[in-house]
Each structure stands twice: as C-alpha cells, then as structure tokens.
Image (cartoon, rainbow, N blue to C red):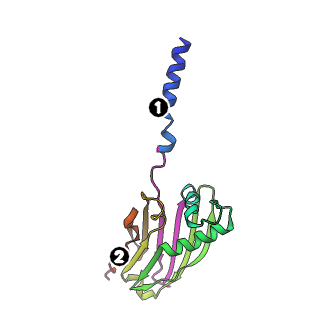
C-alpha cells in the first residue's frame, strides 16, 4: 500500500514538474505612448518582466554582469532601449528623454518624455518596437497609442519587430 502510494506520488511529480516552465511561454514588452493634444507632450512607458531582461543583458552588455544590480549593464540597457524603439509623428522623429527607470524585482519600467506640436496630435504616427526581438525569437511587443481619447494597438512579432508600423491620422 505504501509502495503504491509512493509510485503514485512520484508519477504525479513527474507530470506536474513542467508546469512552472509552462507558466511563462513567451517574451514581451508592453509599451504605452500617450500624446497630449493640448500641450503636445509625449510620454512613453515600457514594462518588461525582469526575468526577461536579466538573461538578455548577456548580449546587450557582454562586458558587464547579467544583472540589474550592475550599473554598467543598466547603462547598456538604457542605450539599447533607445536604439530599438522609435517614434515618429507627422514624419518627424520624436526625441525621447528618460525621465524615470524602475528596477523592480518583477518588472523593469522605463518612462520617457518628448514633445510634438499640439497640431500634430492628429497626425500619422510611425512606431518601431524591436526591443529584445534580436534576443528572443518569440518576442511579442505590444504598443498602445493613446491620443484624443482614442487608443490603438500595434503588435510587433519576433523577426518582423524591427519593421515600423504606422497609424493613419485621426480625422476631425
């Protein structure tokens, strides 16, 4: 009886062992772009699971430790994020300045600010969101763009993440 119970417990252990690995199947960044039509102020936030960032640091900052505790790795990550994400409004590049960086246990959050003409809040928008797509082949980045009370979503997948996507102007 005890031997049978031990066999059942061992079998259940083998069946359930893969579940923690299955809980996180993909990699992705959630980004939000907001354009204030009154001021032309632009804010961009990126939220990234910390367990996706730290292993990627080996490629982003090969001379640093693969840890968010290493200042050299964090500096390389800041440069990488600006290199792999871009925003154009009315065909003009929006210069983004890092306002805040939160290195949490579960999440890394970047907050950027920029400026466009208030008249351009309705203009065409082009986004490139290739963050980590060169590292994780299954990377899926979602960018939500909010302006004039309208939110639109762009999704960037794996090898195609480096290709810019556009939103048409909002008609009056």
Q: Which residue is mark 2?
A: 166
Which residue sits at x=53%, y=63%?
Answer: 47
Question: Residues in magenta?
Answer: 22-49
- Please tell me the numbered disc located at residue 81: none
Q: Earlier in the sequence, mark 1 or mark 2?
A: 1
Question: Tags 1 and 2 in contact by the CB under 8 Å rule?
Answer: no
Asked if residue 47 is positioned above or below residue 150 in the image, the reply reads: above
Relative image position of residue 33 (x, y in whole percent):
47, 73
Which residue sits at x=49%, y=27%?
Answer: 12
Which residue sits at x=45%, y=84%?
Answer: 93
Asked if residue 106 is positioned above or below residue 39 in the image, the reply reads: above
Q: CA distance from mark 1 to mark 2?
A: 45 Å
In the image, 162 versus 44, the foreground residue is 162
Relative image position of residue 100 (x, y in whole percent):
62, 72
Please identify the quarter of the rendering in which residue 144 is found: bottom left
Membership of 27 in magenta stretch: yes
Q: Nearer the viewer, mark 1 or mark 2?
A: 1
Question: Is residue 111 at all visible to an observer of this figure?
Answer: yes
Q: Which residue is mark 1?
A: 15
Which residue sits at x=55%, y=78%?
Answer: 113
């Amino acid at each position: 009886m005890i031997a049978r119970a031990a066999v059942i417990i061992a079998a259940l252990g083998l069946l359930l062992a893969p579940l923690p690995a299955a809980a996180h199947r993909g990699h992705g960044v959630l980004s939000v772009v907001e354009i204030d039509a009154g001021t032309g102020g632009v804010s961009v936030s990126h939220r990234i699971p910390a367990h996706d960032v730290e292993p990627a640091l080996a490629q982003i900052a090969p001379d640093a430790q693969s840890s968010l505790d290493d200042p050299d790795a964090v500096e390389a990550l800041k440069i990488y994020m600006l290199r792999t994400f871009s925003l154009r409004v009315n065909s003009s590049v929006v210069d983004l300045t890092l306002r805040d960086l939160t290195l949490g246990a579960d999440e890394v959050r970047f907050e950027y600010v920029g400026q466009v003409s208030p008249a351009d809040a309705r203009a065409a928008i082009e986004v490139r969101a290739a963050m980590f797509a060169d590292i994780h082949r299954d990377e899926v980045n979602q960018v939500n763009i909010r302006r004039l009370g309208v939110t639109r979503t762009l999704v960037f997948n794996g090898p195609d993440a480096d290709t810019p996507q556009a939103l048409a102007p909002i008609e009056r």
